[in-house]
Amino acid sequence: MEQAIFAATTTAKPQPVWNGVYFNTNTIIPWPIVLAFTLLYFGLLAWAWRPKEGRAFGKFRTLDFVYVALTAALLVVYNFFISPLIPKIGSVTTYFYYPLIGEIFLLELVAALSGRPGVAGLTMFVYTLLSDVIHYGFGGEPFWFIYEMTAYGALIDLWLIYRGEAIFTPYLKPPKIVATDGGEAEGAPPPSNMGMTFLDGAISGAWIGMAYPFWWRGFWGTFVTGYVTTVQFWAITSVTQLLAGAIVGALIAPLVWYIKQVAT
């Protein structure tokens, strides 16, 4: 009898601690690294969003919030209604989930049209909120907000702090406007280098591509849901999706650049 009770107590499946979260820190990526990266991202985001000209989000315009809302809505439509219809090929989707191409395009586009640091993270925040409302529910929160913002938007936002509005243009920095009303010109545009556009695309695509295999499998999936995988599978899928995402992002970059030219 005692042996039966002992077996029952030692084989019981662990239960979530709070709001569907297991708080399992037996993860591939050590939790202090994730914590430090998260604090760094939100710290730099707070610096980029420091009030300017009476606006709480720094240089954000009303149009930027429109871009965020539209992109988040399109991400919901794409991920829940279009992406599942795309045929799944096991050997491809295991090492590169090719429906992710649509998400790479949409996040690159909102970064290009806005150019404001934090626009990618804000888009993913709104997307996660909409996803929770219409599909997932709020179990596991607030950690899914942190995951989506840091895993998909962080590096794009940090890159935007450096590149600013010049992202997805051939310029290293935004060109100054030349006066045409007889006034003194502010200066000429910097030398054009189309390679910067492809670099923007490669950085964005690589970060988005590795978000799920590296961050979810490596930390957030285990921390929140108790997900377990091997280090080998985590490493292989992270590397392959990073490389594939970089290639896809660079290939999409000229289209994003063209849309930005037309829209702005």
Image (spheres, rainbow, N blue to C red):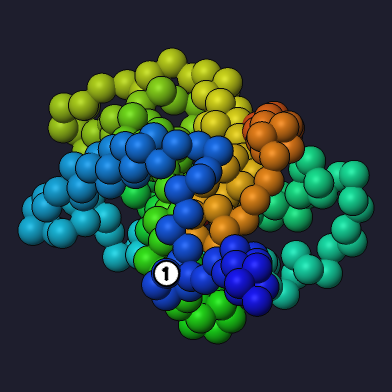
Instruction: Tell me if 74 is positioned left or right of 36 in this view.
Output: right
Dot 1, how many residues are within 10 Å of its Cα: few (below 14), some (14-19), or many (20+)?
few
The answer to whether residue 164 is visible is no
What percent of the width, then of the height, locates residue 167? 45, 36
Q: At label 1, which amino acid type do we have?
A: Val
The answer to whether residue 227 is visible is yes
- Name the residue located 48 percent from the left edge and 54 percent from the top edge: 24
Instruction: Tell me if 132 is positioned left or right of 247 in this view.
Output: left
Q: For this rendering, which residue is in front, 149 or 168?
A: 149
Q: For this rendering, which residue is in front, 216 or 11?
A: 11
- Name the residue located 27 percent from the left edge and 59 percent from the top edge: 61
Query: Badge 1 is on which residue?
Result: 17
What percent of the width, then of the height, locates residue 149? 43, 53
What percent of the width, then of the height, locates residue 260? 52, 47
- In the rendered image, the residue lying farthest to the bottom is 134
- Name the residue located 24 percent from the left edge and 34 percent from the top edge: 179
